[in-house]
Image (cartoon, helix red, strand yellow):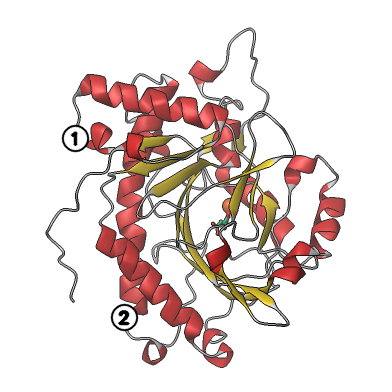
Amino acid sequence: MPENKTFPSPKVQATDIVSEIPVIDFSQFTKGDASARDEVSKSMVDAFRKYGFVYLINHSIPEYSISQAFRMSKLFFDLPLSSKTQAPHPPGFQIHRGYSHPGLEKVTDLSLGLHPKITKSLARKVPDLKESFEIGADANSEQPNVWLPPNLMPGFRGSMTGFYWTLAEFSKEILRALALGIGLGDENYLQKFYTGEHNQLRLLHYPEVEAKVLEQRKAVRIATHCDWSAFTLLFQDDCGGLEIESPTEPGKFIEVEPIKNACLVNIGDLMARWSNDILRSTPHRVGLPPLQDRYISTKQMRITRARYSIPYFVTTTPDSVIECLPPCVDEKNPAKYEPITQREYNLMRASMNYN
Ligand SMILES: O=C(O)CCC(=O)C(=O)O
Ligand SMILES: [Fe+2]
């Protein structure tokens, strides 16, 4: 049956959802009065202080845009390797666009506090079992997009560009909520650093894999890492497996159950730095799904289902100087970080993930 694009889906109550990660009804921000907006912003910032993650429900991103993006993503990854590699991720780390085959990208865990070279070589010993496709704004000439020849997948470019800009617009609401919640006074304070052109839409596919391979740590789906964005919007299918570091027991990870159509938002390292670590950039990873029906078992093998997710990394313009925000600095908490441009910061982080 074709999807009805105009009929609004019934409103979900945050209290109906069982989740360790706080769940917030974001319609209270987009449609609420000043005091409702204030309350939502404060709850979001509280969640970001404690967990670094929050689930938004009843947000304004249309459900059909999310399902269309997942449909397109699956069609893309179903293409033969010889087609996908016609939009190759350029060699090196300077440009982060196009298709990365399994094993090409390897995220690193800076939170271990080791020397960057050691962190990088340790991480490379256990490959990430994922393939990805990175998309930016066509207007971003510093990071030119790498598209497939159009005949290989008609509609892919248009559809992904549309989704990119839907999320770029939505991100302005998050920036407003952050500005209010942090206490910047002017809700448009953070917009000055943002055009939407420097975000990154990422399609991720974790292929089916024998559970034993992950259990024996021969490979991981995505290794423990922090994002280096200002914040990330994450959409996931119902497979599960995302885990975040516990806010109370460092080194222990808690499961993040997928919530249909919800938008998971997490703080990245850039925003942690900008907020003088008031907001947490929390290490996270993707492991085996906790639910048993996500596995296919034969006599010889137990195989976990494929997983699809779509992160959208939101960041500022490259020339923005990221300097601890005034409400986050006082005598007790002096600024921990030197000012740095987003460009310098991004390059430093990108160099850790690709050879
Ligand atoms: O696949 C996921 O759910 C998480 C992906 C992720 O953390 C990332 O790409 O940075
Ligand atoms: Fe991540």
Type of the residue with mark 1: Lys
Closer to the chain start, of discs 2 and 1, is 1
Q: Is residue 29 above or below residue 98?
A: above
Q: Residue furthest top?
A: 331
> Residue 242, image x and y in percent?
58, 53
Q: On the rendered structure, is 74 left or right of 307?
A: left
Queried on whether the Cβ of the residue with tag 1 lies below 8 angstroms from ligand 1, the answer reads no
Considering the image in quadrants, where does the C terminus appear?
A: bottom right
Q: 213 or 35: nearer the eye?
A: 213
Q: 14 or 113: nearer the eye?
A: 14
Q: How many marks?
A: 2
Q: Is residue 71 above or below residue 315?
A: below
The span from disc 2 to disc 1 (Cα, nearest Å) is 33 Å
Mark 1 residue crowding within 10 angstroms, few (<14) / some (14–19) / many (20+):
few
* Residue pointed to by mark 1: 31
Q: Is residue 189 above or below residue 89?
A: above
Q: From this viewpoint, is residue 232 visible? A: yes
Q: From this viewpoint, is residue 97 visible? A: no
Mark 2 residue crowding within 10 angstroms, few (<14) / some (14–19) / many (20+):
few
Q: Residue furthest left?
A: 6
Q: On the rendered structure, is 172 left or right of 232?
A: left
Q: 296 or 165: nearer the eye?
A: 296
Considering the image in quadrants, where does the N terminus appear?
A: bottom left
Q: Which residue is found at the position 16% from the left and 64% from the top?
A: 5
Q: On the rendered structure, is 129 left or right of 307?
A: right
> Residue 269, image x and y in percent?
60, 40
- Of badges 2 and 1, nearer the viewer stands 1
| Local secondary structure at mark 1 | loop
Queried on whether the Cβ of the residue with tag 2 lies below 8 angstroms from ligand 1, the answer reads no
Type of the residue with mark 2: Gly
* Residue pointed to by mark 2: 155
| Local secondary structure at mark 2 | loop
